[in-house]
Image: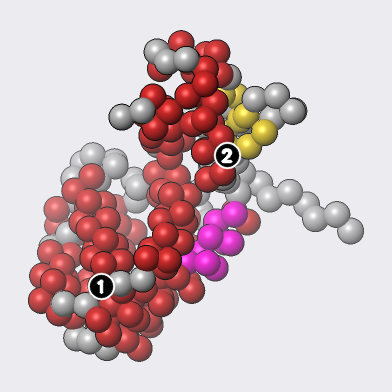
Amino acid sequence: MRASERAYRELRADIVSWRLTPGQVLGEVDLSERLGISRTPVREALSRLTADGLTEPHNGRGVVVSAISAGDVRALYELRDSLDCRAAELAAQRGDRDTFRALAEELSHAAEALSDDPDHPAYYELVDRMDAEIDHAAGNPYLQQALANVRLHLARVRRLSTSNPRRLAIAAAEHEAIARSIAEGDPALAVATTRVHLKNALGNALRTPELAPVSPVAS
């Protein structure tokens, strides 16, 4: 793996997991020493992170980790409504019913298996697998690419709200309903169940206290 790719992946993971927090300065010299690589691949990695929207220029010199506000979260969910609902609709039309029937069965037991680990890795692995199956079933690479970028930013918010087991149990039931609607080949129901999940997920995300305040709009 190229040094710039390794640096990009490590820094992206640190930002998504909040090991690197909003507003934290990312200096090329410090990062090159920490990662054990030259400044050129670090610079390339930071450029990619800025293109992703995970970092932003800082006073004309270097970059900082981007803040994420309640307004950002609302905007992301507005986009998710279009993308996720369309993906679920296409998956219901094109997907393998047995695949989604099996996912629904797994999700029906997901709440019972929520671990004491605040990150709940097994649960989120299942949710990620369902997302991947929906993407595959939808069969639209452009839609998949757009969803990947949105999910990257939402992963930062999810990291802050993973410790609410009651919400996770409800979310598991919502995911199960989506999977069953796709398994039944019902596009309208797939859209409706997806929209219910997104509405509830947005409400939960907006209760995250670590979100940055929204800047006032100039009159």
**Is 7 on the left or on the right of 130, as rendered?**
right
Q: Residue at x 29, y 42 (%)?
A: 119
x and y percentages locating residue 111 in the rendered image: 19, 59
**Which label number is shown at residue 137?**
1
Above or below 40: residue 212: below
Q: Residue at x 26, y 51 (%)?
A: 124
Amino acid type, callout 1: Ala
**Is 10 on the left or on the right of 168, as rendered?**
right
**Which label number is shown at residue 50?**
2
Number of marks in the rendered image: 2
Q: Quadrant of the C terminus?
A: bottom right
Q: Secondary structure at mark 2?
A: helix
Q: Secondary structure at mark 1?
A: helix
Q: Earlier in the sequence, mark 1 or mark 2?
A: 2
In this view, the residue in front, 166 or 125, is 125
Above or below 153: residue 98: below
Above or below 43: residue 34: above
**Which label number is shown at residue 9?**
none
Based on the picture, tell me whether residue 96 belongs to the magenta stretch. Answer: no
Image quadrant assignment for residue 24: top right
In this view, the residue in front, 1 or 186, is 1
Q: Residue at x 37, y 65 (%)?
A: 141
Image quadrant assignment for residue 96: bottom left
Amino acid type, callout 2: Thr
Q: Residue at x 41, y 77 (%)?
A: 86
Based on the picture, tell me whether residue 74 belongs to the magenta stretch. Answer: yes
Q: Which segment did they paint magenta?
A: 72-80
Main secondary structure found in the magenta portion: helix
x and y percentages locating residue 163 in the rendered image: 34, 45
x and y percentages locating residue 183 in the rendered image: 18, 80
In this view, the residue in front, 67 or 96, is 96
